[in-house]
Image (cartoon, rainbow, N blue to C red):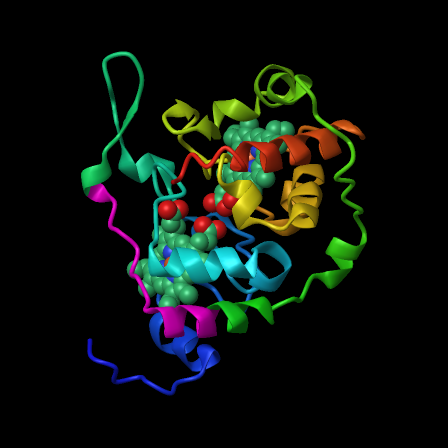
Amino acid sequence: MPAAHAGETGAALLQQRCVACHDLQGPAPTTLTQLFARKAPDLFYAGNKYQTAWVAAWLQQPKRIRPAGMLYLDHIKPGVKRDMVDSSTLKPHMALNNDDANKVAHALALLKPYNDRIKAVSHDPSISPGPLGEMLFDKIYGCMACHQIEPDFGGLSAPEIFTAGKRLQAAYMLSYIRSPQAWDAKTWMPNKHVSSPNDQKLVNYIIELSKENFDE
Ligand code: HEC
Ligand code: HEC
């Protein structure tokens, strides 16, 4: 499309180009019917969740985050040794130009209905996961059954975790790990009842992973 929408505000762009797939109003699905109808991640609390610089950059060059899309079962074919992602059924995300991407990212950053949840946690970057980080994530809490810790290594049913430290705010990750259902009542992520400071170590492990620049 030519620059027909030049001069639009970020909020207007969201309404025109994003609401067909993304929920910008809330609340998150509370029934399975609503869950299965969800086409894309909820964005109505984007300002409490994402790093704005990441949003602006990703929208210009989107790369897949959920290896099997929003609904794992829709995009899986049985493999010989394990199930495989049928990527022919996954469509690439639309890309925006620099100007629109920045406008939209700033409009999304204003959507902060859950400041109270974020204020209720205190991320401590000084608690090093040390060599235990991967063991906590993989063996002790079984997070890797669903999340990849590097490309093609880990589960396929949830967002890749090796870019999450760039994508997400640390306090959001801490709050979500403590209680996934408080954020998304029907999410498949189980509450693993991670005790402190292991919750902080997991968040700091995820942040360390993202520094390895697997996505570049
Ligand atoms: C045709 C449906 C569709 C449209 C239209 C669409 N998106 Fe998306 N969007 C998706 C899907 C599906 C994902 C998940 C992609 C993945 O996991 O790889 C996604 C992911 C995202 C993400 C990453 C968030 C996350 O947690 O993974 C952002 C940010 C985003 N979209 C913003 C937008 C914006 C802004 C617009 C409008 C300019 C838009 N999208 C239009 C389907 C859509
Ligand atoms: C049964 C599968 C499963 C397990 C096990 C699991 N998760 Fe998740 N996780 C999910 C799903 C599903 C989502 C949200 C999906 C979405 O946004 O599309 C999620 C989301 C997340 C997010 C936010 C990611 C994002 O990009 O929005 C983080 C951080 C996270 N999980 C960390 C963990 C940690 C740490 C553990 C172990 C304590 C864990 N997960 C165990 C399925 C799982």
Specify the farthest residue to the top: 81
The quadrant where residue 174 appears: top right
Residue 78 rendering spot, x and y as whole percentages = 25, 22
- Quarter of the figure that contains the N terminus: bottom left
Image-quarter location of ligand 2? top right
- Quarter of the figure that contains the C terminus: top left
Residue closest to the eye, 147 or 28: 147
Does the segment drawn in magenta span residue 78?
no
| Residue 19 in sight from this viewpoint | no
In the image: residue 174, left or right of residue 137: right
Residue beneath the point at 66% across and 36% down? 203
Start and end of the magenta stretch? 89-104
| Residue 203 in sight from this viewpoint | yes
Residue 70 rendering spot, x and y as whole percentages = 39, 45
Q: Is residue 140 above or below residue 19?
A: above
Q: Is residue 111 above or below residue 189?
A: below
Q: Is residue 186 above or below residue 138?
A: below
In the image: residue 100, left or right of residue 93: right
